[in-house]
Image (spheres, rainbow, N blue to C red):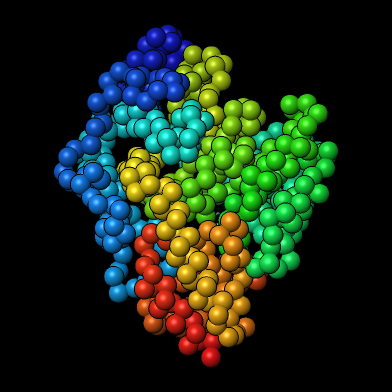
Amino acid sequence: MADARLRRRSVLTGGALLAAGAPALLVGCSSSDEPGDESGDDAGEPAASTTPPRLEDLDLSDWEVVRGQFALDPELAHFAAFVLASHPAPVRAAIERWRDAFDADPAATVAGELAHDEEVRTAAAGYLGVRPAEVALTDSTTMGLGLVYHGLPLCPGDHVLTTTHDFYATHEALRLAAARAGAEVERIALYDDPAAAGADELAGRVAAAIRPQTKVVALTWVHSSTGVKLPVRAIADAVADANAGRAEADRAILVLDAIHGLGADAARPGDLGCDVFVSGTHKWLFGPRGTGIVWAAPAAGAAVAPTIPSFTAPSFVNWLTGGDEPSPFGVGNTPGGYQAFEHRWAVTEAFAFHQAIGPDRVAARTQELATRLKDGLAELPGVRLVTPRDPALSAGLVCVDVAGRDPAEVVQQLLDQRIVASVTPYSEPYVRFGASIVTTPEQVDAAVEAVAGLAR
Ligand SMILES: Cc1ncc(COP(=O)(O)O)c(C=O)c1O
C-alpha cells in the first residue's frame, strides 16, 4: 500500500495524494493558529463573477441600508427571520462566488479547504474574542451540541444538569450521550413564571442543583420557549464556586446553546464565562444556511473527543503516517467529509457584516425593537406577555399568549395581515416574535395593533 511508504514530508506537500483523490486539505497541512500560512493557498480562490457589495461603501449606520441588504419579501414584516436566516447581499455574493468557483474547477477550489476553513475560524474568533484554534466549524447548533455532549468523557454515576426550558437538541443529545455513558441527566425548572423571572432566582436555582457528581451544566442562553435570557455570567460564577477545590478532571463545565444570543446580544464567551459556546450561524447572525460553530475554552476543548473524523491535519496525517499528534479542538472537532463549502466559507462574510454594523449597535437595535414590542403587547387586554420586560433577561425573542387562543391559529391570522411570526416548538406553545435588524419600529407597531385586534 503506497500510504505506508509516504513520508511525512510528502504528505505535507501532497500533490500525489490530491491527484489520488485524497482530501484537498493535505496540500499544506498545518495545525497553525495563523490563517493563510500554507503554501499554494491561491489554489481555489473564487472566480470574480459576482461583484460583492463593498461593506465600506455602505452606510450601515442607517438601518434602512442594513435592511436593504436582504432580499426578504418587502410585503411582509419578518418577525420569524431568525428561525432560518435570509442571507444579506455580501453573504449571497460570497456564496455565488464560491459556487461558481466549484462549478468551474472543483479540484482546484477544494484544494484551498484548509486556508478557507481557517479564514472562517479567524472571522468567528475575531467576533467572539477567542483564538481561531478554539473554533470548530459545524453545520448547525444541533450538530455542535451532539459533538460536544457525545465527545465529553461522561462516566457511570456522573450527573448532568440541564433545564426544562431547553430545546429538543440539548435534551436529545444529552439523553443519547448519557444513555451510552450510564450518566444521569436531571432537568430542573429555573422559573415558574418566565415573565417574573429574576436573575438571582435563575442563578440560584442552578447553583442549588449542582452536586459533587455534576460534570456538565447544559444551558441555553436565550430560551426559544419563552424568550428568557439567562444571566450566564452569574451562573458561570456559581459553577466556578462549585468547582473550587475540585481536581481538574472533576470540574463541572458550563456548555451553552448560544443560538438565540449570537447576533442578537453582543456578549462574548469571555463575558459570559461559559466553557463551551455552541451556535448555528444561520439564525440571528444571518449567516449561510447550514452553518455553525463551537468554541471551547482550552481545558474543556481538550476533554472533548472528536466524534466524526476530521479531514484536517493532524488527524488525517496521523492516519497516513501512524503519528499520534493531537488535534487542536477547532480542527479536530470540525467534521470531515466534503461540505457545502460555498456556504461554509461565506460564514466569513456574515461575521464581517455584523462587525461592520457593530455588534453593540446590533444588540442595541434588537433590544430597542424588542422593548417597543413588549411595551405595546403588555398593555393589551387579553394578551399575556411571557418574556421578561427587563432587557437584562431577554434579547430579541418575544413570546405571548393571546387570549388563551391556539398560537398556530393566531400566527396564521397575523400572516393574513402580512406579519410573519412563529409558534414555539414546545409542549406549552406560545406565539413568538423575533425583533431584529430586519424589522422596523413601524412594523413593531403594526404587529402590536394586529395582536390587539386578535385579542378582542
Ligand atoms: C434553543 C435552540 N437551539 C437549537 C436550535 C436548532 O438550531 P440549529 O438549526 O442551528 O440546529 C433551535 C431552533 O431551531 C433552538 O431554538
Taking the spot 40% from the left edge, 57% from the top edge, the residue there is 85
**Please, is residue 91 above or below residue 440 in the view?**
above
Q: Position of residue 265 (x, y in %)?
A: 50, 51
Q: Residue at x 56, y 76 (%)?
A: 378
Left or right: where 10 falls relative to 151: left
- Residue 103, given in percent of the width and then of the height, sits at 23, 42
- Residue 455 visible from this viewpoint: yes
Residue reaching furthest to the bottom: 456
Horizontally, is 315 left or right of 45 in the view? right
Q: Position of residue 219 (x, y in %)?
A: 65, 50
Q: Looking at the image, which residue is at 72% across and 62% down?
A: 191
Q: Is residue 409 above or below residue 348?
A: below
- Residue 368 sits in which quadrant? bottom left
Q: Is residue 150 or residue 203 the one in the foreground?
A: 203
User: For the N terminus, which image quadrant?
Assistant: top left
x, y percent for residue 403: 60, 85
Instruction: Note whether 373 is above or below 158 in the view shown.
Output: below
